[in-house]
Image: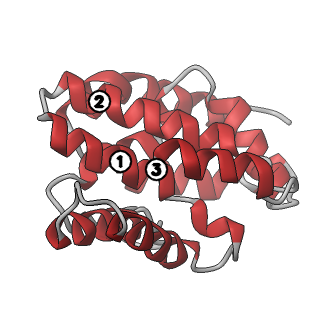
Amino acid sequence: MVTGIVDRLRRELDASLSYHRPAHTEDVVQQALTLAKLDALDAHSMLLIAVAAAFHDAGFLVTRSGHESVGADMATAAMAKDKRFSQKDIDIVANMIMDTQVYQTGAVHRSNTPLSAWLLDADLANFGRDDFFEQFHLVALENKIEPECLVSATIDLMDRHTWQSPAGSACFESKKHKNREALTQASF
C-alpha cells in the first residue's frame, strides 16, 4: 500500500510541484518511522504512521487546495480493501492526514490522534535539519515567489511551530533555532 501510492506519485504527480514531490513523501515516511522507532512505538502504530505518511500529500494528485481531505479519502479507500485494518485504524489514519493541515494563525498543527505527533514532526523535519535552506528554496519555487518574500512567513511559521513527539524535539529543536537565526540573516 505504501509503495503503491509512492509509485503512483512518481508517475502522476504534477512536475511543477518542486517541494511536494515524491521525494518529500518518501522522506516523510522514512523520518516518521525513524522518530516512532526512537520513541519505541509498537509495530501496528508504526504501520498506521507509515500509511498516513505515504498518503499525507497524495491529494496533490487531484488538487492543491484541500489536498489533505483528498489524501485522507484515498487512504480510507485503500485501507478498506486491506483486512489488516479496522475501522478505528482507518479513522486514525484519515485524521492523521487531516492533522497535517498547516494553520495560518495559532498553532501550526492541531493534533487529533495519539499517533499524529510523529507524522507532523516528520512533515516539518526540514525546519531542524541541514537541508532547511534547500527545502526553503523548493517551497519558494513551487509557490512561484522570490525567496526573500517567503522569509517573514517562514519565520512566523517556525515561531508558532512546536515539535509534537519526544524524538522530534530531541532530534530537531536545536538545529531549528539555528536555521531560524540563519534565515533572519540570509540575503537572497
Q: Which residue is mark 1?
A: 119
- How much space separates mark 2 and mark 1, taking CA atoms? 9 Å
Q: Is residue 144 visible?
A: yes
**Which amino acid, mark 3?**
Met
Left or right relative to 140: residue 182: left
Residue at 38% across, 55% down: 52
Which numbered mark, 2 or 3, is in the foreground of this view?
3
Quadrant of the image occupied by residue 3: top right
Q: Amino acid at mark 2?
A: Leu
Task: Estimate the x, y position of residue 48 in percent, counting from the top left.
Answer: 27, 50
How many angstroms separate mark 2 from mark 3 (CA)? Answer: 21 Å
The amino acid type of the residue labelled 1 equals: Leu
Residue under pointer 3: 1
First in sequence: mark 3 or mark 1?
A: 3
User: Label for residue 21?
Assistant: none
Do tag 2 and tag 1 residues touch (Cβ < 8 Å)? no
The residue at which mark 2 appears reads as: 35
